[in-house]
Amino acid sequence: MDEIKIKCKNEIRSFFGLTLINIVVAALIMALGIGFGITQLLVVINSGEILLTPLFLIGAGFTAVIAGVYWLTKTAEILYGIDQINSTYEQLPQHPNQDQVTNVFVEMLAHYRKNQPLIGTMTSLGRISGVIFIIVGCLSLIYAGYTLLVSGIVIEGLSQLAGGIIAACVGIGSFLIAKYFKSYAGVWETRLQMEPTIQDALKKQLEGN
């Protein structure tokens, strides 16, 4: 039973990690949208003319901000549910019985089923953002290496090197978390389909919500 408890904790951590990745993605979308929109707005102000292209880009920037806020709100809702599941887990005794651990699994399955389409999108975004971070990190590392070879040890090269390492690590972490979460989601799908006792408990949990 202790082994099942550890497995339960790992599944909760995977759920939390995926949500955290998506919160970071939403925050980056908001930041990029704000920066892009303001830059184009300054172009319009400095030129003193109403140009179609900058106006379109301003609209795109603030659309990105709205999308970021929306996604941040949705992922925050998922995170709230995970916090509740984790609170239930933390209340387990050191050596819980089967029913106590099953209750945590049922809460997790209920949260997953209720938000399944959204969580599927979160998984895809986690993998896509992971690939993007890895590419950006590798390009930054290549550019940093070139800068250091040409100019020697300079602050610009070192900052690019640090940024590239961080981006690559974040990307690898994002991709792996999304990948592991996908495997857990497959296990949850099997539980939902194959275990009548889980189905009954899940039905009661959903009715209670």
Image (tube, rainbow, N blue to C red):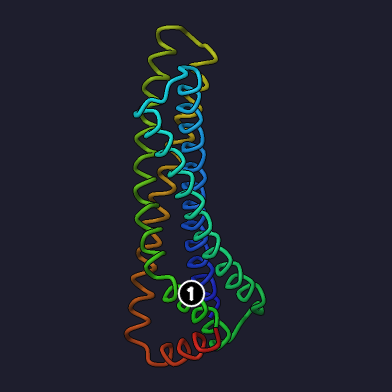
Quadrant in which residue 179 is drawn: bottom left
In the displayed structure, does residue 108 sit left or right of residue 50?
right
Quarter that holds the C terminus: bottom right
Q: Residue at x 52, y 11 (%)?
A: 154
For residue 70, above or below residue 101: above
Q: Residue at x 45, y 40 (%)?
A: 169
Q: Residue at x 38, y 45 (%)?
A: 130
For residue 150, above or below residue 118: above
The residue most toward the front is: 49
71 or 148, which is in the foreground?
71
In the displayed structure, does residue 90 sit left or right of residue 77?
right
Q: Residue at x 50, y 17 (%)?
A: 46
Residue 156 in percent (x, y) is at 51, 16
Residue 113 in percent (x, y) is at 41, 76
- Which residue bears the numbered disc 1? 111
> How many discs appear?
1
Label 1 CA crowd tier, 10 Å (few <14, some 14–19, many 20+): some
158 or 74, which is in the foreground?
74
Tell me which amino acid carries mark 1: His
135 or 64, which is in the foreground?
64
For residue 54, above or below residue 130: above
For residue 12, above or below residue 179: below
Which element carries disc 1, helix, strand or loop? helix
Residue 184 in percent (x, y) is at 39, 68
Quadrant in which residue 145 is drawn: top left
5 or 48, which is in the foreground?
48
